[in-house]
Image (cartoon, helix red, strand yellow):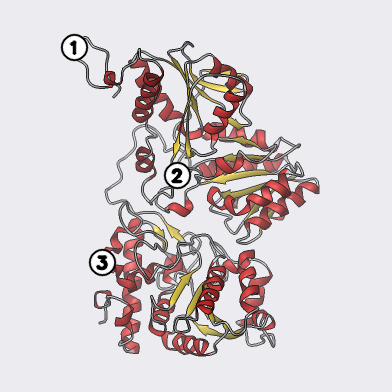
């Protein structure tokens, strides 16, 4: 039997017989199910492209021929076949393989796009570059799913590819009728017609001026090879329409659990330990979804919008109860936001639920289509801050920096389940402009009660004020870290007040007033430091004429490698110990009365070190 171990690179595939390719496909599926259910990752999309990936690497000669993958979450077979099978067990683990294409991993990974609908623009630019440089011996191949065709960038790419009938680009349309969920809209309906015997005389691609090959069986390597070879010979832009089954070869993923098996969580490697401290805390997404549904029962003007991610963003419950008030616009975040502006102009209050990383794609629409019109739209940003194992493209570390630039936008950052529910109620009550709230991936943890309130802000710990006293401004889920830092600083002889503004934008006037009464203001957030919440606080204090020094803690402005959220935050210094140490150092630079060497262990009778 031909196994993965016998394939060290694409060249080894071309000598395989049809039976051997079938055996190899089965072995790849076995590895995918075993390893991905252990490490976590995207299972369904990869099970569906095994034969397609084999055929691509048998027909085209990567890396000379450039094979590019849209989204990139279906490239596990590609990684296995390009020499990374031996390290596949480290998928999405710290120091291991990325869950997406990675140029640092392999010369076969051309682009690192893990946001959908982009690959055709890459292909258009690469083909133009080859033409201008006189390079004619390299193929440009772009693999894109039917779900990604619901995104506007895909059609901008097709429009430009079709404009040059002499420029060869092979577009492989991987049609499995799904993204996270069944694909919606007019495009999937057209593709469905192409799959039937009573198909229209011309496909939309042919009407645009491109060649069209298919539909072909995406699980028959021989048929795929013939179609791809034919497409490569045409010498112009061509769409090869491949029909595949998401989750193929793994019964739970093929059947009614297909959505759940798009991506799977890691399988625990040790037996679960019974809890003795009560039930686990709820998931952030579930808390949001439940609260929105309750609000929807009382507010008939509330509507929900998703960009092909109904379940992942927590809208399934709302959709089940209010289907006529739920809109899935496909992988089209830009359209989602401007459509929300239109809904608001029509007298409704839209709630746009997105992953924080995908808001990046719709910033212009938020700025000019929503905020400029003062439209009452609420943005709910899931997976904000450091998300961890999905890597650089999925960290939601840019949102607070972007949101600071939007005039009239009010931004809430809840610290726990209770403040999330409260923030959502407050956000949808705003009718004179847009609001946003954001929360991270995972569980909420225990609620952190306030000991006091001050002009709408929650005081989590109160101490005196003065030149040796510190005001710690906690942003969202960093509350626990701030309280730990406060405990360490208190042991070191400092008075520390910890405050959670809850609504961080605009900066509350009361926060500025409190800052004037302290010797140092330190802000702590899990987003990027450049232009983030801390920068806004520092600017507000400076604008007030304050001379109080401000120390901002956050994520450095760089693309973070994949890893566990806690480990990444620790590397960024976002721990109680790291913050306490840096605060003491900041005060030491300001005032010689505090010495850096006090951080070292002291002899008996000396001041305790910050531990």
Q: Determine whether the residue tagged by mark 1 lies in a helix, strand or loop.
A: loop
Query: Residue tagged by mark 1?
Result: 604
Going by the image, does 371 lie left or right of 38?
A: right
Query: Residue tagged by mark 3?
Result: 86
Residue that sits furthest to the front in the current view? 133
Measured in 3D between alpha carbons, the distance from the residue under mark 1 to the one under mark 3, in whole angstroms, is: 54 Å
Which of the image's four quarters has the C terminus? top left
Which mark is in front, 1 or 3?
A: 1
Mark 3 surroundings within 10 Å by alpha-carbon count, few (fewer than 14), some (14 through 19), many (20 or more): few
- Reply above or below: 143 against 201: above
- Reply above or below: 315 against 73: above
Q: Determine whether the residue tagged by mark 2 lies in a helix, strand or loop.
A: loop
Q: Residue at x 47, y 54 (%)?
A: 393
Which of the image's four quarters has the N terminus? bottom left
Residue that sits furthest to the right in the current view? 346
Measured in 3D between alpha carbons, the distance from the residue under mark 1 to the one under mark 2, in whole angstroms, is: 41 Å
Q: Residue at x 69, y 40 (%)?
A: 434
Q: Residue 560: horizontal and vertical position, in percent?
A: 41, 49
Q: Residue 408: horizontal and vertical position, in percent?
A: 70, 37
In the foreground, 500 or 418 = 500
Residue that sits furthest to the left in the current view? 604
Query: Residue tagged by mark 2?
Result: 386
């Amino acid at each position: 039997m031909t196994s993965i171990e016998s394939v060290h690179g694409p060249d080894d595939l071309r000598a395989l017989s049809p039976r051997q390719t079938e055996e190899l496909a089965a072995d790849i599926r076995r590895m995918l199910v075993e390893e991905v259910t252990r490490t976590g990752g995207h299972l369904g999309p990869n099970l569906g492209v095994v034969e397609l990936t084999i055929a691509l690497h048998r027909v085209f000669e990567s890396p000379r021929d450039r094979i590019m993958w849209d989204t990139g979450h279906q490239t596990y077979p590609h990684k296995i076949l390009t020499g990374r099978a031996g390290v596949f067990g480290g998928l999405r683990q710290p120091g291991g393989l990325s869950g997406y294409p990675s140029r640092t991993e392999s010369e076969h990974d051309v682009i690192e796009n893990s946001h959908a609908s982009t690959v055709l623009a890459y292909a258009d630019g690469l083909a133009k570059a080859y033409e201008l440089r006189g390079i004619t011996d390299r193929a440009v191949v772009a693999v894109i799913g039917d779900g990604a065709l619901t995104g506007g960038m895909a059609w901008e790419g097709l429009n430009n590819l079709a404009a040059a009938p002499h420029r060869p680009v092979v577009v492989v349309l991987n049609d499995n009728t799904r993204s996270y969920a069944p694909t919606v809209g007019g495009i999937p309906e057209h593709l469905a017609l192409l799959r039937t015997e009573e198909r229209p005389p011309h496909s939309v691609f042919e009407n645009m001026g491109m060649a069209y090959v298919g539909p072909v069986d995406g699980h028959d390597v021989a048929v795929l090879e013939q179609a791809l070879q034919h497409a490569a010979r045409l010498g112009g832009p061509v769409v090869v329409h491949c029909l595949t089954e998401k989750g193929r070869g793994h019964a739970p993923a093929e059947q009614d659990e297909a959505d759940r098996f798009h991506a799977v969580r890691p399988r625990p490697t040790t037996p679960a330990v019974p809890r003795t401290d009560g039930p686990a805390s709820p998931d952030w997404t579930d808390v949001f979804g439940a609260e929105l549904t309750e609000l929807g029962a009382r507010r008939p003007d509330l509507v929900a919008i998703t960009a092909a991610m109904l379940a992942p963003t927590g809208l399934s419950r709302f959709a089940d109860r209010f289907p006529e008030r739920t809109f899935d616009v496909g992988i089209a975040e830009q359209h989602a936001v401007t459509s929300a502006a239109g809904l608001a102009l029509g007298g409704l209050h839209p709630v746009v639920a997105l992953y924080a990383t995908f808001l990046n794609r719709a910033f212009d629409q938020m700025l000019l289509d929503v905020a400029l019109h003062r439209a009452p739209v609420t943005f709910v940003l899931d997976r904000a801050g450091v998300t961890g194992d999905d890597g650089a493209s999925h960290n939601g570390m840019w949102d607070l920096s972007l949101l600071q630039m939007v005039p009239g936008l009010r931004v809430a950052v809840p610290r726990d389940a209770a403040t999330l529910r409260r923030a959502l109620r407050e956000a949808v009550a705003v009718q004179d402009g847009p609001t946003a709230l954001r929360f991270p991936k995972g569980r909420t943890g225990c609620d952190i009660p306030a000991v006091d309130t001050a002009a709408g802000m929650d005081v989590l710990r109160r101490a005196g004020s003065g030149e040796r006293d510190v005001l710690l401004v906690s942003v969202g889920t960093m509350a626990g870290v701030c309280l730990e830092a406060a405990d360490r600083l208190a042991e070191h002889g400092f008075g520390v007040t910890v405050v959670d503004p809850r609504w961080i934008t605009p900066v509350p006037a009361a926060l500025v007033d409190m800052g004037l009464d302290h010797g140092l203001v330190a802000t702590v957030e899990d987003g990027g430091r450049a232009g983030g919440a801390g920068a806004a606080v520092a600017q507000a204090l400076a604008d007030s004429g304050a001379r109080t020094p401000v120390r901002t803690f956050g994520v450095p402005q760089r693309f973070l490698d994949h890893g566990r959220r806690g480990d990444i935050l620790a590397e960024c210094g976002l721990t109680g110990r790291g913050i306490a140490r840096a605060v003491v150092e900041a005060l030491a630079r300001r005032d010689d009365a505090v010495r850096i060497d006090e951080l070292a262990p002291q002899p008996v009778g000396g001041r305790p070190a910050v531990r």
